[in-house]
Amino acid sequence: MRSFSVYLLNLGCPRNLIDSELILGILKNKGFKIKKQPKDVDLAIINTCAFIKEAKEESIEEILDFIELKKEGYIKKLLVVGCLPQRYREELKKELPEVDGFLGVEAWKNGLAEWIKNFIKINSFNSSLAFSERYRLTPPHYAYIKLSEGCENFCTYCVIPQIRGNLRSRPLEEIVREVKGLSESGELKEINLVAQDTTLYGKDLYGKPVLLDLLKELVKIRDIPWIRILYMHPAHISEGLIKFIAENDKICPYIDIPIQHISDRILNRMGRKITKKEISHLIDWIRREIKGVALRTSLIVGFPGEREEDFQELVDFIKEVRFEHLGVFIYSREEKTPAYAFPEQIPEEVKKERYNYLLEVQKDISWEILKGYIGKEMEVLIDEKISDKDYTFLGRTKYDAPEVDGGVIIKDKNLKPGDLIRAKIIDTWEYDLLAEKL
């Protein structure tokens, strides 16, 4: 059998990225050559996102671009997978006949084998693969670890339960085995635990959340100095979890709690199952327990019924709490969600005004927080070289997650990606720190 080539474009969140890595791992094991550009390839795959309006638009734009590449002869077959076809498969088939195939989420185990068998005309195709054998798209020094699939929170604005189903956790032993396997290279410095809600991990399998039990096993793995937990629902964070994070240097003092809003009226309409008082208490308690903790949150502006006083309450809260990292999303009206039918839908121009205003508020807060780091010595993980000309590298501290947070800019010709160094912060620049190696 001749060798086939494949190019994969991943869109969306780290959970999607892991699915893409599994797809590529399976194809690589079957002899496919993985290409870095979508030129002269037998197969191009787009793993799409369809969480909100902007993600759907980006996915469609990329598909149309790849259809043009196919027409020009750069790619022979085009396969679209992930959240977009999971939601709109029949519509996509009708509107985009140039695409050769559509598969939904977790395509690596749901349909990929059958599709590839037809594509390369073989009788058997084994799509089983250990998570640690996936083809990594992240740099060798960090990896995302998926704890579970799906969600059982059913927030009124969210389509994830429709797209990815109810909570389905991976066995604890399997995750530990995956991390041990990834650590064997000796290059891995950081793992980032992801799920739709990491705090509920294991509830479906073991009758209760077992994130704490998982962490107790992961900290025993010697060769990984940084463990980071992402996507922790504020209503489900336990006292034991926070205390364990505070007591273990391996676990990054970084708490990612997407509060989404702070007005009790809006939180109730969102179905968040938590109040402003409880959120405030949680944040105060986390900051008391974990020395020097960095807090990240995400917010939704323009949710149906968000009045000016609700938005101002959110602004005042952000100014008071001063999150180290903050992401803002404009509410996206998604069909088949309860919020789609809610009255008092907010005009787009009002949503955008609130979005821009909140970003400006956070920009000032971030600037003030970053200035407080000047003169401090910190551990920095080098991610990439951003300039060959003057040996400029971009790294991160324990207080910064990959891809979504700011970083540390260092000039030193003796560095390389994956180095874990000590550095002194000497200045700030927008959302980043400037440092010199010690």
Image (cartoon, helix red, strand yellow):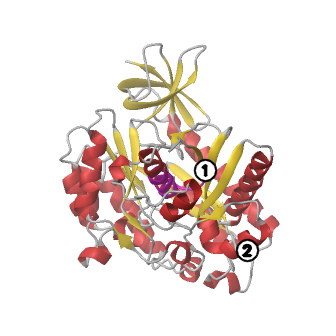
- Name the residue at 52% across, 59% down: 117
**Relative to 336, is 119 above or below?**
above
Q: CA distance from mark 1 to mark 2?
A: 40 Å
The spot of residue 292 in percent (x, y) is 36, 45
Crowd class of label 1 (few under 14; some 14 to 19; many from 20; radius 10 Å): many
Q: Secondary structure at mark 2?
A: helix
Say whether residue 70 is left or right of residue 193.
Answer: right
Say whether residue 8 is left or right of residue 39.
Answer: left
Q: Report the span colored magenta.
A: 9-23
Closest to the observer, 185 or 380: 185
**Relative to 307, is 16 above or below?**
above
Q: Mark 1 belongs to which amino acid?
A: Gln
- Name the residue at 40% across, 35% down: 140
What residue is shown with label 2? 91
Tell me if residue 4 can be seen: yes
Q: Main secondary structure of the magenta part?
A: helix
The spot of residue 306 in percent (x, y) is 68, 75
Which of marks 2 and 1 precedes in the sequence? 2
The spot of residue 320 in percent (x, y) is 52, 57
Q: Secondary structure at mark 1?
A: helix
Tell me if residue 107 can be seen: no
Check residue 28 for magenta coloring: no
Closest to the observer, 175 or 152: 175
On residue 362, which mark appears? 1
The spot of residue 283 in percent (x, y) is 40, 61
Closest to the observer, 142 or 308: 142
**Relative to 156, is 294 above or below?**
above
In which image quadrant can residue 327 be found? Answer: bottom right
